[in-house]
Every structure is written in C-alpha cells, then in structure tokens.
Amino acid sequence: MDECKVIIMGFGAVGQGVADALFMKKELIKEKTGFEVKVVAAADSSSSAISAEGLDEKLLVDTKKNEGKLSAYPEFGSDKNGAEILDAVEYDCLIEATPTNIVDAEPALSLTFKAFEQGKDVVTSNKGHLALKFKDVVSAAEKAGVEFKYEASVGGSMPIINFVKDTLSSCDIKSINGILNGTTNYILSRMTSEGSDYEDILKESQELGIAETDPTQDVEGIDAACKTVILANSLLGIDATYSDVKVEGISKITSEAIELANKDDYLIKLISEVSPDNLQVSPRLVKKGSSYDVSGTLNMATVKTDLADEVSVIGLGAGSLETASAMLTDLISILKNKN
C-alpha cells in the first residue's frame, strides 16, 4: 500500500474538519486511490503536533478543542509553527487551511510557495493568495511540476471549479452568476421571511456562529469578491485580482427595500457576476422561484455555456465538514493522478 503523508496547516474549523473527514474516509480513500493517507503534522497559529509515523486525527481535534493548542498533543506536541513545520517532517501534500488574508495573503502565500519549492502538492481552502496573486501562484505550481487544487476556496461543498473544468470541459464558459457567500444569504433570507431589520438578524447570526464577530468580509462583499476573482481566473481565463472587482455589500439593505421587492415577486440577493465585461458583487433583484431563490447558508452558481446553455449548481457554502469535503475531493483527485 502506497502512503501519502499530509501536513494540515491551519487548525481552526476547516483544519479540524479535514482531520475529522480523513478519520471518517480513510478506507474510502484507500479503495479509490490505493493510498493510505497519514497526517504527519498539524499546526495552529502558535503550535503543532508532528510525527513521521502519523498522528491520530481524532486526538488532534480533541486536543485542540480541550486544550486550545496542538502543543498539548501527547508525546508529539511541539512549539514549532509556520513555515518551519514544512522542514520538520517528510510529507507529500500540504493541506493549507489558514485564515484568508486579503492584505498580503500571508501565511498562505509563503507556505504554498515553500511547498512548491519542495516539490510538494498543495490543496487549499484559502482565498487570499488566489484573489491577490492567482497567476503567480498557479504559474509557480506549473513550474514546479506539482498539483495545486483549490475547489474549497469557492462555495464550500458546492462543486463549481472541478465541475466546470471536468464535467463541462466540452463547453466555452461565457459567464457565471451566483450567490457565493452563505452568511449574507442567511441574513437576507431571514430579513425576507421575518421582515426584521438588518442589524437584528446580523446580531442573531453572530450568536449562532453563522456570522463572524467582525462580519466585515462577509457583509461588505469582500469574501464574495475574492471568490469572483478565483472563478474569473480559473474558469474564464481572465487575468484579474481583487482590485478589479466592483464591490457593494448588504449593510445598507433595509427591511422596507426587501418588502417592496417581495410585493413584486422579487428577492434581494448578494450576486457575484463573473464575465469578460464585468466583475462585480452587489445586491440585486432576482425573481422568486428562479435558480437564485435559495435560502439559509446555501450557495449557488449559474454557469452560462455555449453548448449546454445554463447549468446551475447548489450546495452549502460554509461549515467545517462541508468545506473539508471539497478538500478531500481535491486530495483524492491528486492521488488518482499519481496512479
């Protein structure tokens, strides 16, 4: 049995979701790929656990939840963190799940480049380095002759990047329009169903853990704009960065505006438009009963093609296991290619 040794960098909700998913799906991965996946290191922002023989995924998650740091992992806990982890143990694939940073894309950018330099494959859920330096990162992977997969960076468990590249590979992609942020969709859905004000629903969303304590990236459209850039580059071949996207969030949407739209059988949704003529995130009117009529934290995207006309996909846009599902799909794809 071949081995695939992985390092999980970033051990918040997504990193823990990856560890849980690997624990659940080890046998499935073996069956599908012929590889046994071993986690040889996992790191949070200040500490890590490292063992060349492999770590217990369940114990990693329990340690982080109970002790708050991975250095408390029995026997193999360490104070090493950051890029030094990649030098500390032999590995085959970096699973990069650090928080998105759209100022300088760190630490994802440095970690990814270092892994490429070491000849390692990378699977990421991060949006920062892709939104700011997509072309540079993808070119570096090609130059290094390694695989770089990023399905989880857009839409959580909603299949969009691999779906378009693989299933719609016979088609030219003309445009993509969709709801790419679950938090804003939840807020707008609740405002519509209850007639409540934005501030009240935002507060409730924060209490439920759907919105962050600082919700700016979601509610001001920044998160959706990052995803817009990724789709523009990866699926339409548009050389764009975050600054090329026109962005407007939902914080100015009133319950009165939603009620007026409702009377005419319309909903207000935060829509991302990806086309050669326009990269934009903004609140728009969509028809009730259309493919854009999804509620809660669901994401959706409608892909306009030359041969298949319009194809829509829907899926949960957030959640630790949901996002981990996309990362495991990417890992399985890499391992299948090795065989």
Image (tube, helix red, strand yellow):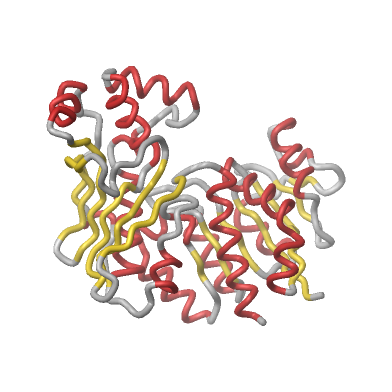
Q: Residue furthest right?
A: 75
Q: Of residues 281 and 226, which is closer to you in this image? A: 281
Which image quarter is the C terminus in? bottom right
Q: Is residue 172 above or below residue 176?
A: below
Residue drawn at the location 48% of the way across and 62% of the way down: 150
Residue 121, percent from left and from top = 59, 71
On screen, residue 109 versus residue 63, left or right, reads left
Among the 4 quarters of the image, the one containing residue 146: bottom right
Residue drawn at the location 40% of the way across and 51% of the way down: 314
Q: Is residue 230 above or below residue 210?
A: below
Among the 4 quarters of the image, the one containing residue 5: bottom right
Residue 19, percent from left and from top = 68, 50
Residue 106, percent from left and from top = 46, 52
Residue drawn at the location 69% of the way across and 47% of the way down: 20
Q: Taking the image as drawn, is residue 238 in sight? A: no
Q: Of residues 167 and 140, which is closer to you in this image? A: 167
Q: Of residues 126 and 322, which is closer to you in this image? A: 322
Q: Is residue 312 above or below residue 78?
A: below
Residue 285, percent from left and from top = 17, 40
On screen, residue 238 versus residue 167, left or right, reads left
Q: Taking the image as drawn, is residue 100 in sight? A: yes
Q: Of residues 237 and 133, which is closer to you in this image? A: 237
Residue drawn at the location 29% of the way across and 42% of the way down: 293
